[in-house]
Image (spheres, rainbow, N blue to C red):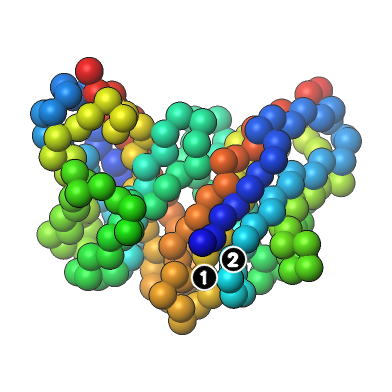
Amino acid sequence: AQRVTQPEKLLSVFKGAPVELKCNYSYSGSPELFWYVQYSRQRLQLLLRHISRESIKGFTADLNKGETSFHLKKPFAQEEDSAMYYCALSGRAGGTSYGKLTFGQGTILTVHP
Amino acid sequence: DAMVIQNPRYQVTQFGKPVTLSCSQTLNHNVMYWYQQKSSQAPKLLFHYYDKDFNNEADTPDNFQSRRPNTSFCFLDIRSPGLGDAAMYLCATRDSGAYEQYFGPGTRLTVT
């Protein structure tokens, strides 16, 4: 069974501080990992995807297969980063579970001024 | 703006009274999903359509049905809502050649 665990429900940091949102997963095979974000009163939207290996809004996430983790990091948090963050997993392209997202429970990030 | 629209945003129904939630999209995506998100829980996939092909998740209750009359519209029918079906229902779309899912704003269902 596939599972995504986000151990922190709430995370508070001050502006300018580094932030790390933790995500661990279990999956038999090679998954695709994503971070989705939901800002206040907005819809859920994709933040980044592990295969892209890009930085979006200063956030990066590295897939660590040994630790089965996909932590989201930003060196200097901004107030506008305050939101709910979901880690999500799906099977690889070409497989039967491709596109079927399994979400973690989410972490509410609050960045204080 | 191309987008995913869900109507209504808030729905109140009575215990056992059938209810239908609606999702429409202007993205022309061929894959559409329905997720259920209960309070403080992760969104959970109920089923999805790949074009006209319906794909039910193994643990989705029989009480939940779906229809997709055309590419643009998808409906979630709850035949006999119970108190435990109160949740946010999210619709999402995806182009089969891409990975990103586009979500609607959700419909919050209350069962009285």
The residue where tag 2 is placed is A27
Which residue is more in the foreground, B16 or B104? B16
Q: Is residue A93 above or below residue A79?
A: below
Chain of the residue displaying label 1:
A
Q: Amino acid at mark 1?
A: Gly
Depicted B93 relative to depicted B107: above or below: below
Say which element carries label 1.
Answer: loop
Which image quarter: residue A52? bottom right
Q: Is residue A6 visible?
A: yes
Q: Position of residue B76 (x, y in %)?
A: 21, 46
Q: Residue at x 62, y 61 (%)?
A: A26
Task: Identify which amino acid the numbered label 2 is placed on.
Answer: Tyr
Position above or below: B81 against A35: above
Do badges 1 and 2 share one subunit?
yes
Q: CA distance from mark 1 to mark 2?
A: 9 Å
Q: Quadrant of the C terminus of chain B?
A: top left
Tell us which disc is closer to us: 1 or 2. Answer: 2
**Mark toward the start of the polypeptide (1 vs 2):** 2
Label 1–label 2 contact, CB within 8 A? yes
Crowd rating for badge 2 (residues with CA inside 10 Å; few <14, some 14–19, many 20+):
some
Specify whether B21 is left or right of B3.
left
Taking depth in this image into account, of B93 and B17 the one nearest to the observer is: B17
Q: Is residue B75 visible?
A: no
For label 1, the residue is A91
- Residue B110, image x and y in percent? 28, 24
